[in-house]
Protein backbone atom coordinates (compact mmCIF):
# COMPACT_ATOMS: atom_id res chain seq x y z
CA UNK A 1 0.00 0.00 0.00
CA UNK A 2 2.86 2.34 0.74
CA UNK A 3 4.05 2.15 -2.84
CA UNK A 4 0.56 3.02 -4.06
CA UNK A 5 0.41 6.11 -1.86
CA UNK A 6 3.85 7.16 -3.07
CA UNK A 7 2.65 6.69 -6.64
CA UNK A 8 -0.40 8.87 -6.00
CA UNK A 9 1.79 11.70 -4.73
CA UNK A 10 4.60 11.48 -7.27
CA UNK A 11 2.79 10.05 -10.33
CA UNK A 12 5.77 7.72 -10.85
CA UNK A 13 5.16 4.11 -11.84
CA UNK A 14 4.25 1.54 -9.19
CA UNK A 15 6.29 -1.59 -8.45
CA UNK A 16 3.61 -3.70 -10.07
CA UNK A 17 1.37 -2.87 -13.08
CA UNK A 18 -2.34 -2.71 -12.24
CA UNK A 19 -3.26 -5.75 -14.34
CA UNK A 20 -0.63 -7.91 -12.60
CA UNK A 21 -1.94 -6.79 -9.20
CA UNK A 22 -5.51 -7.53 -10.29
CA UNK A 23 -4.64 -11.05 -11.49
CA UNK A 24 -2.65 -11.76 -8.32
CA UNK A 25 -5.53 -10.69 -6.08
CA UNK A 26 -8.04 -12.62 -8.21
CA UNK A 27 -6.07 -15.82 -7.71
CA UNK A 28 -6.22 -15.39 -3.93
CA UNK A 29 -9.96 -14.67 -4.01
CA UNK A 30 -10.56 -17.77 -6.16
CA UNK A 31 -8.65 -19.87 -3.65
CA UNK A 32 -10.95 -18.69 -0.86
CA UNK A 33 -14.04 -19.39 -2.99
CA UNK A 34 -12.79 -22.93 -3.74
CA UNK A 35 -12.18 -23.55 -0.01
CA UNK A 36 -15.64 -22.26 0.92
CA UNK A 37 -17.32 -24.44 -1.71
CA UNK A 38 -15.07 -27.41 -1.03
CA UNK A 39 -14.22 -28.09 -4.67
CA UNK A 40 -11.95 -27.19 -7.54
CA UNK A 41 -12.90 -24.31 -9.82
CA UNK A 42 -12.33 -23.74 -13.51
CA UNK A 43 -11.61 -20.08 -14.24
CA UNK A 44 -11.97 -18.24 -17.55
CA UNK A 45 -9.59 -15.26 -17.21
CA UNK A 46 -10.91 -13.56 -20.36
CA UNK A 47 -14.50 -13.48 -19.06
CA UNK A 48 -13.45 -13.36 -15.40
CA UNK A 49 -16.04 -16.01 -14.59
CA UNK A 50 -16.05 -19.56 -13.33
CA UNK A 51 -16.73 -22.05 -16.11
CA UNK A 52 -20.23 -23.55 -15.80
CA UNK A 53 -20.47 -22.78 -12.07
CA UNK A 54 -23.14 -20.22 -11.21
CA UNK A 55 -22.80 -20.94 -7.49
CA UNK A 56 -19.11 -19.97 -7.51
CA UNK A 57 -19.82 -16.93 -9.69
CA UNK A 58 -22.04 -15.55 -6.94
CA UNK A 59 -18.89 -15.15 -4.86
CA UNK A 60 -16.94 -13.49 -7.68
CA UNK A 61 -19.12 -10.40 -7.83
CA UNK A 62 -21.71 -9.32 -5.34
CA UNK A 63 -24.88 -7.48 -6.23
CA UNK A 64 -24.22 -3.74 -6.30
CA UNK A 65 -26.66 -1.06 -5.22
CA UNK A 66 -27.83 1.64 -7.57
CA UNK A 67 -26.40 3.83 -9.07
CA UNK A 68 -23.23 1.72 -8.94
CA UNK A 69 -24.62 -1.42 -10.57
CA UNK A 70 -23.56 -0.45 -14.12
CA UNK A 71 -26.16 -2.86 -15.43
CA UNK A 72 -23.84 -5.79 -14.61
CA UNK A 73 -26.24 -7.74 -12.43
Image (cartoon, rainbow, N blue to C red):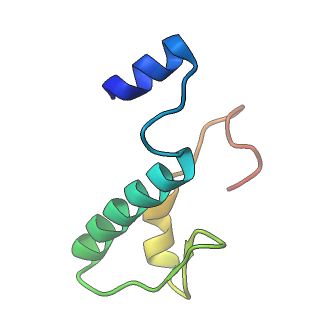
Instruction: Indicate whether 9 appears above or below 48.
Output: above
Locate residue 28 relative to residue 49 in the image: left or right: left
Query: Can you name the residue that lies furthest to the right here?
Result: 71
Q: Residue at x 52, y 46 (%)?
A: 17
* For residue 33, above or below residue 10: below
Q: What is the x, y in percent for residue 4?
A: 42, 27
Number of dots carrying numbers: 0
- Relative to 63, say whether 7 is above or below: above
The percent position of residue 13, horizontal first and vertical second, equals: 54, 31
Image quarter hosting the N terminus: top left
Q: Is residue 63 left or right of residue 26?
A: right
Residue lying at 67% horizontally and 35% vertically, measured from the top left: 68
> 24 and 64: which one is in front?
24
* Residue 34 relative to residue 55: left or right: left
Q: Split into 4 quadrants, where in the image is the C terminus?
A: bottom right
Q: Position of residue 40 (x, y in %)?
A: 32, 87
Foreground residue among 35 and 6 = 6
For the view shown, which residue lies furthest in the front direction?
Answer: 12
Which residue is found at the position 52% from the left and 56% from the top? 61
Give me the residue at 72% from left, 31% from top.
67
Which quadrant of the view contains residue 27? bottom left
Amino acid sequence: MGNFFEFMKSRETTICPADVGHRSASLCHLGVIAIRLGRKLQWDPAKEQCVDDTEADKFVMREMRKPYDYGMI
